[in-house]
Image (tube, grey):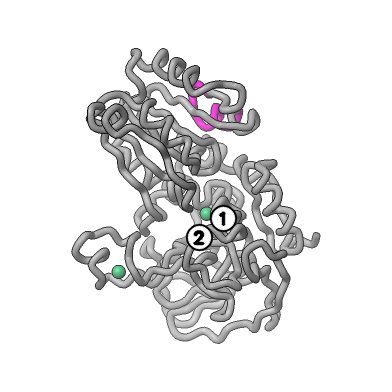
Amino acid sequence: MSNRILAAVMPSPRQPIEIREFDRPDLPPGAALLRTARSEVCGTDVHLWHGRLSGVPYPIIPGHVSAGTLDAVRGRIVGLDGSQLQEGDRVVFFDVHRTCGRCRACTVHRTPTRCVARRVYGITDPASEGLFGGWSRAIYLEPGVGIARLPDNVSFDDYIGGGCGLLTAVHVLERASLRPGESVLVQGTGAVGLSTIALARLGGASTIVAIGAPATRLDLARTMGADHVLDLNGSTVQERLDAVRALTYGEGADVVVEAAGSARAIEEGLSLARDGGRYVVAGHYTDAGQSHINAHHQINRKHLEVRGCWGSEPGHFLRALALLERYASRVPWRAIGERTYALNRLNEALQDAERMRITKALVDPWAEA
Ligand SMILES: [Zn+2]
Ligand SMILES: [Zn+2]
């Protein structure tokens, strides 16, 4: 790799993505340089582009989940999976870094995803500090970043097809406390919703229902393991409620997962859970506005448990890898990554993602456009 490294930079919200050259970084002991093979354009990148996340230090190099080959390693680096890492290894890394282990969130409450110091590659790392994003031919892995070998039978496209949505879904299933034989309803058929369906199926769910759009994503939801899909377009809230109750002994689903990111989904979803059921909110990564709910009817009298789900931890990352190693030949995560874009086509990729023309855009920073 040359000493000048091409990367795609998001200068500020609503501005076109620009290609810029960066210096190849000097590596301190414990650091590595990753030659990027794949990154992704996820819903968060669209939110970043719209300026809807707070505390983002633009300009940034987006792309928070990525995979590649170690180009250079300085000193001894042991991966999160316990292996010693070497140049030439195919690896992936956990995008959250600098979690402090000292703040109240880390120590008292044991909720490290709410750590005050944590930073995330591609989201809260500024381009002024270097190659901290995957829309780049190389990524600087600073000392302390959690790296893991990609299992031999998992391709870069498998890993990025699952991507951040799969990590989130691992956390969602944990928050949902899914018990074997329970019914699961998933609101939203984007990357998080699709992986949630797959993991609910693997996790022993009985009936799985998905509500989403467009039709191509509903087909994919079926392939990922949904028994029934309800098209958000062309159906009313009442029709969907009737349909879900008809599939769940007239009660509503044991577990409902919101992976839609819409304030209306919350209003509807609370009523789709059974009395005493669980409702996991996983789609509101940005402020989608106010939801109008009736706490008496929809939460208190229902004896409903409502749980948020923010970010992920290294354990979710490693378990996502274990799931890919075991199930990528059966579960078509790869199909979620619908089209691959070169660095200079990322404005198009963002527009395609924004308009839901594709399920997920992948980034190949070495592709010639
Ligand atoms: Zn993401
Ligand atoms: Zn902390």
In contact (CB < 8 Å): disc 2 and disc 1: yes
Q: Residue at (49%, 26%) from the top-left corner?
A: 226
SS assignment at label 1: helix
Q: In which quadrant of the rendered image does the N terminus lie?
A: bottom right
Q: Is residue 181 left or right of residue 342?
A: left
Q: Position of residue 347 (x, y in %)?
A: 72, 58
SS assignment at label 2: loop
Whether the residue under disc 1 has CB within 8 Å of ligand 1: no
Closer to us: 284 or 137: 284
Residue 214 in magenta stretch: no
Q: Position of residue 252 (x, y in %)?
A: 35, 21
Q: In which quadrant of the rendered image does the C terminus lie?
A: bottom right
- Residue type (three-letter) at the residue carrying disc 2: Leu
Q: Quadrant of residue 76?
A: bottom left
Closer to us: 306 or 66: 306
Q: Residue at (26%, 71%) from the top-left corner?
A: 103
Q: Residues within 10 Å of mark 2 (few under 14, many from 20)?
A: some
Instruction: Return the disc, 2 or 1, that comes first in the chain's sequence.
Output: 1
Residue sitting at the far right: 369
Residue 226 in magenta stretch: yes
Q: Residue at (54%, 80%) from the top-left corner?
A: 129
Q: Which mark is residue 47?
A: 1
Task: Confirm whether residue 157 shows in the render.
Answer: yes
**Depicted 301 relative to depicted 71: above or below:** above
**Depicted 194 relative to depicted 227: above or below:** below
The Cα atoms of the two marked residues, 2 and 1, are separated by 7 Å
Q: Which mark is residue 53?
A: 2
